[in-house]
Image (cartoon, grey):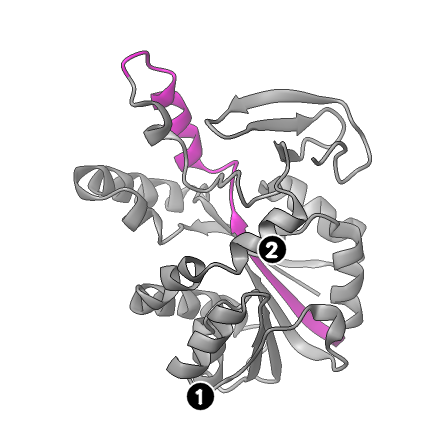
Amino acid sequence: MQSTCYCGQTKAQLVKVLPQAKILQCDFCNLMRTDPSPLAQTAAEFYGKENVSESQSSNIELWKSFSKEILDFIKPYKSKGSFLDIGCNIGVLVNEATLYGYIAQGIDLNVQAISKGKELFNVNLSAAPLEKLEKKFDIIALNHTLEHIHNLRDFFTQLKAHLNPEGLLFVAVPNARGGIPFVLDLLNRKKSGRGSQWFWYGYLPEQHVWQFGPQELSKIFKENGFKIVKCSARQNMHWGATANPGIRFKMMAILWWVFKIFNRGDNLFILAR
């Protein structure tokens, strides 16, 4: 259980009750966290399951589109060089980065995902933790990985150690402060609502240790020696399309368009150096 916040404080307010867990907000830094926190051992077992890799391999075109969105976000600031994707799953982003001209490789703890990726793409993938890598990179990408990390301070230290001078760190996380979770929370308050079906798909309490917003995450970057180059919440999580089929997806698509205009999308991109 994550008994303390990233900032070291223990006092927190209950902000949401989910079927599997609660969401707490730190009284000191406002960062939200899942309670009880996913245990590291349980997470390792989860990421080793075959269905984790199937979620990407069965929707490759969707993930290619998402990967291109990420690379288009990065490219104006660094258009070539070495590229590491941490938590690469089957390697869709690694493959697209290679096509964009980067010298790309990916790492993931899911052995089955790495094996599947090697079957699908001719790219450099390995089932290894970051600390086992000896080289440095021009770009490190964390595509929906950071919210799974328990010890953020140690992890940011490792990231620093593996970045070249003037290297870029890209992070994409669910935006718990976005417009979509706000609207779904309002719907869920209705007594005639549909219970857990209205809960935002980005919480994932069985996997996510942290529930980030733009201000809290930007502060963490700065505290760990990174300077924000660009921060945007004009993106939306593509798998909302599969989490909300039929008419509900059409409703979500309208909301996505509206919140994208106001920089309140449910997918947060940050680029830093």
Residue 268's x, y, as percent?
A: 52, 50
Work out whether 46 lies above or below 108.
above
From the image, which quarter does the C terminus lie in?
bottom right
Residue 181's x, y, as percent?
A: 43, 33
Q: CA distance from mark 1 to mark 2?
A: 26 Å
Q: Sequence order check: which comes first, mark 1 or mark 2? A: 2
From the image, which quarter does the N terminus lie in?
top right
How many marks the image carries: the answer is: 2
- The residue lying at 45 percent from left, 41 percent from top is 264
Query: Is 146 displayed left or right of 179 in the figure?
Result: right
Q: Which residue is mark 2?
A: 44
- The residue lying at 54 percent from left, 66 percent from top is 110
Query: Is 2 displayed left or right of 181 in the figure?
Result: right
- Residue 147 visible here: no
- Magenta-colored span: 163-192
Mark 2 element type:
helix
Work out whether 156 lies above or below 61.
above
Q: Which residue is mark 1?
A: 122
Q: Amino acid at mark 2?
A: Ala
Q: Amino acid at mark 1?
A: Asn
